[in-house]
Image: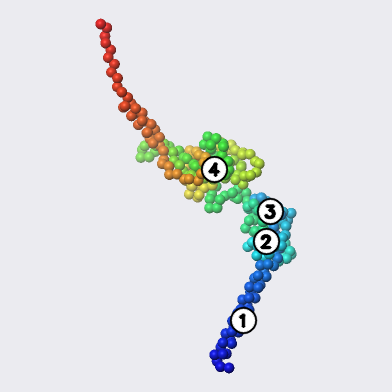
Amino acid sequence: MNKQTLIALVLAAAAALMSYYYLSEKEDAVRADVSPVKVLIAKKPIPRGGRLTLDKLTIQEIPGAYVMPGAVSASNQENLLKQWNDFSGQFAVVPIAKGEQILPNKLSKLLPGFAGVVPEGMRIMTFALEAAAAVGGHLKPGNHVDVLGTFDFQFKGVKRLTTVVLSQDLLITGVGDETTADRGKDKPASYSASQGGTMISLALTPEDAVRLSLAEKEGSLKLALRSLGDEDKLSLPDQSLGTVLGPLMRTQADDIKSAPRRLEIIKGLQ
């Protein structure tokens, strides 16, 4: 046997060995995908804030390929119950539908409370507003509003009264003690009269939170309710008495100028 033949045989054997291991791994993967795995499933809907107890859950066998990453699952019931002990009694931070697999990232050891309605990256601040400044008490959690601020201040020795649009399209997360977490429940709105006004909670960016905190202290705030689905943000100029009354005063001045002059001659008695 010459050297070239020997090298060819060695390479062929190596290729055959690699093919064998590759096919074995694929076979194991396929076998794992179809092998039944025991998974914890919600037996009935679990609302946000609901406590996880065994009466709300059931064990179901499904092919491994259909087990969601991180789901509470195991190859046998004993190991599954051991895992369950780590999550027993925890609270759902989001609603869990009937038939849904139990995922640890949807559970918390703490009751979510109001923090559960805070959109990611936002902050919630509450403002005490008179009914007239809060759309007459017609606001509901889930509505969107614009915030207007009116300020009376001195600038270069001149007194100014100005109204500006401070923020647009803000989500109302709470009105009194009713929050967006209560939507869909048969619970009437309850307005708090503490601090002399309706308590309105808004979801704000950190920048808006700082700006509105100052605006509330130095001026007066008023909310403007948006229609459902209106997300447009407009570029609106600040308004002062000059910009509001100026056009009206100019119109009146023009009317006076354009009024025809009449000369009345009174003749004496003859």
Counting from the top left corner in percent of width and height, residue 211 is at: 47, 46
> What colouring does the structure picture have?
rainbow
Q: Residue at x 66, y 67 (%)?
A: 33
Q: Which residue is mark 2?
A: 72
Give the CA separation, mark 3 to mark 1.
48 Å
The residue beneath circle 4 is 228
Residue at coordinates 54% horizontally, 90% vertically from top-left? 4
Which of the marked residues, 3 or 1, is nearer the chain's N terminus? Answer: 1
Q: Alpha-carbon distance for marks 2 and 1?
A: 38 Å
Which of these two is toward me, 88 or 57? 57
N-terminal of the pair, mark 3 or mark 4, is 3
Report the number of numbered marks.
4
* Circle 2 SS class: loop
Q: Are marks 1 and 4 in contact (CB under 8 Å)?
A: no
**First along the sequence among labels 2 and 4:** 2
Q: Which residue is more in the foreground, 145 or 26?
A: 26
User: What's under tag 2, amino acid-wise?
Assistant: Val
Q: Amino acid at mark 4?
A: Leu
Residue bearing the label numbered 1: 17
Q: Kindly check if marks 2 and 1 are in contact, taking CB atoms under 8 A apart as contact.
A: no
Place of residue 214 in the rendered image (x, y in percent of width and height, measured from the top left): 47, 44
Residue type for callout 3:
Lys
For label 1, the crowd category at 10 Å Cα-Cα, with few meaning under 14, some 14 to 19 and many 20 or more, is few
Nearer to us: label 2 or label 1: 1
How far across and down, in percent of the image, does residue 143 sit? Answer: 55, 43
Question: Which tag, 1 or 4, sits closer to the chain's start?
Answer: 1
Q: Earlier in the sequence, mark 3 or mark 2?
A: 2
Read off the residue under disc 3.
Answer: 98
| Image quadrant containing the C terminus | top left
* Residue positioned 41% across, 40% down in the render: 238
Whether residue 248 is visible, yes or no, is yes
